[in-house]
Image (cartoon, helix red, strand yellow):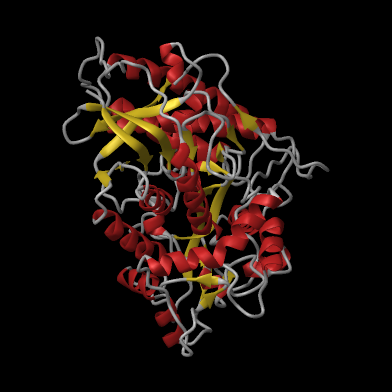
Amino acid sequence: MALETDYLVIGSGIAGLNFALLAAEHGRVVVITKKAPADTNTNWAQGGVAAVLATDDSFERHVEDTLVAGDGLCDRATVELCVNDGPAQVQRLLDLGVRLDRNAAGDLDLGREGAHSRHRVVHWEDVTGREIQRALVTAVASHANITMLDEHIAVDLLSMAKYGGDAACFGAYVLDRRTGEVKTIVARATLLASGGTGKVYVYTSNPDVATGDGVAMAYRIGAAVCDLEFVQFHPTVLYHPMARNFLLSEAMRGEGGVLRLASGETFMEHYHPMKSLASRDIVARAIDNELKKSGADSVFLDMTHLAPAFVRGRFPNIAERCLSLGIDITKQPIPVVPAAHYMCGGVKTDHTGATTLPGLYAIGECAFTGLHGANRLASNSLLEGMVFSTRAAAAVKDAPRARPSQVAPWSYGGATDSNDAIVVALNWDEIRRFMWSYVGIVRSNKRIERAGRRIEILRDEIREYYLDFKITSDLIELRNLALVAHLIIESARRRKESRGLHYTLDYPDKLAEARHSEIQLTNGPRG
């Protein structure tokens, strides 16, 4: 028997939980999350939320900073919508019980990050995302209209097209990771808030859950995806064998941190007038270029010229983590390298989060709203999650209930239990390594074509495996990871220019007209 609800939310980060809280005021909400509710990209976010709150700032400046960082590909209307709503969303966070740092005068403390022309980032120490996640999870846990299902992973979205109707989404098949049971959840509106795609790359700042599930599932049932070639590589992830995925906040450079080579020389002045405060695409490419020139393992982020008490007070979590690894950031430069961080493209949506498929909404990192363009401005992502979850929660109130009279339960058919799980692990590793080498920070036609050939071979193997064996969480993620890799490769192949985060040796110049790269499945489902 299917589980019935008004709204199904896939993901438990800032976008999914804020939507759930608002939508629960007019309907029943089921939230599914792959692991624990706090296993999200939001929980790992360090910087904060960008909003115009200072007297020397303006909406126009924030809009312009976003457009410049987006390298000509932002949608101005979307940018203006988000920026104008920023102060209200900061107040919403405060109302939810989120703690934010304040200065000596009692006003919100505003940080500055790369490519921002003003201090406008509200934060809680250097663990803003963790604090937001805490407040949201607490609020959701006490709401009578919200059911949270942890250790549940979506397998596929349910489509009316499978029952002879028009293409529309009405829920999802969901695997209970504890029991192996696949549940059918039917909803008036299904909301993808599943986060990003960082695990497509071997080096990433993202948690293990970031496998592109929302993008893959939406594409498989016919929703349009857009601009997936624009993968943001964060310039400063800690380089240390014991520091897996540990991000060093861009706010460190915003507060005066300087990038240096192993020799102690600075280098960013050769790449951009803003030096170490340039936008992420420029800084990541600069570091990548310097490492390739020198053969060094890392560059260094230097905070030693700043007052030790200020550094420890502003970045307590980072200071503590580095010290546990033998690095005193007040006395030693910190070894850093770029790593995959954020997907600027995603499932195409309008200003209410609605995708091109009725009944299906997408918000947060898995969505393409037009805000980020070819390169995301730091700390605009948490803002985007709040703005569009608020708008989506209002939009779904009038969503019609469309579903077949009988919903087919999940069937394993003739599938059996796998006795060769090493295949999943090896395919996973191979995808992530060739994506890093061939479709990473610097690309070329030859590299992209190599990646394209490899991914099609692996997708065939994965499809065969998927049909032969009973699904597991690892297999679901691998299937999604492979499809997202294919879509990134195809998007990169189509872009015959270098713009923002997409830099290719064969087309180093920018085209006069900025165009999006939209892809939609038209020839029937293919995993």
Q: Is residue 161 above or below residue 102?
A: above
Task: State the image quarter where residue 401 is shown.
Answer: top left
Task: State the image quarter where residue 280 is shown.
Answer: bottom right
Apparent side of residue 104 relative to residue 148 in the rendered image (left or right): right
Q: Residue furthest left?
A: 179
Percent across and percent down for residue 232 are: 56, 50
Q: Is residue 195 above or below residue 240?
A: above
Q: Is residue 45 above or below residue 224?
A: below
Q: Which quadrant is home to the C terminus?
A: top left
Query: Which residue occupies 68% across, 61% down?
Result: 63
Identify which residue, 494 or 83, lies in the foreground. Answer: 83
Query: Which residue occupies 74% across, 35% down?
Result: 496
Res 241 visible: yes
Q: How many marks are shown on the rendered structure?
A: 0
Q: Which quadrant is home to the N terminus?
A: top left
Identify which residue, 293 or 317, lies in the foreground. Answer: 317
Apparent side of residue 477 relative to residue 490 in the rendered image (left or right): left
Percent across and percent down for residue 104 are: 46, 90
Percent across and percent down for residue 468 are: 29, 14
Res 48 visible: no
Query: Which residue occupies 37% across, 72% down?
Result: 99
Q: Residue furthest bottom?
A: 105
Q: Is residue 233 above or below residue 85?
A: above
Percent across and percent down for residue 525 are: 48, 17
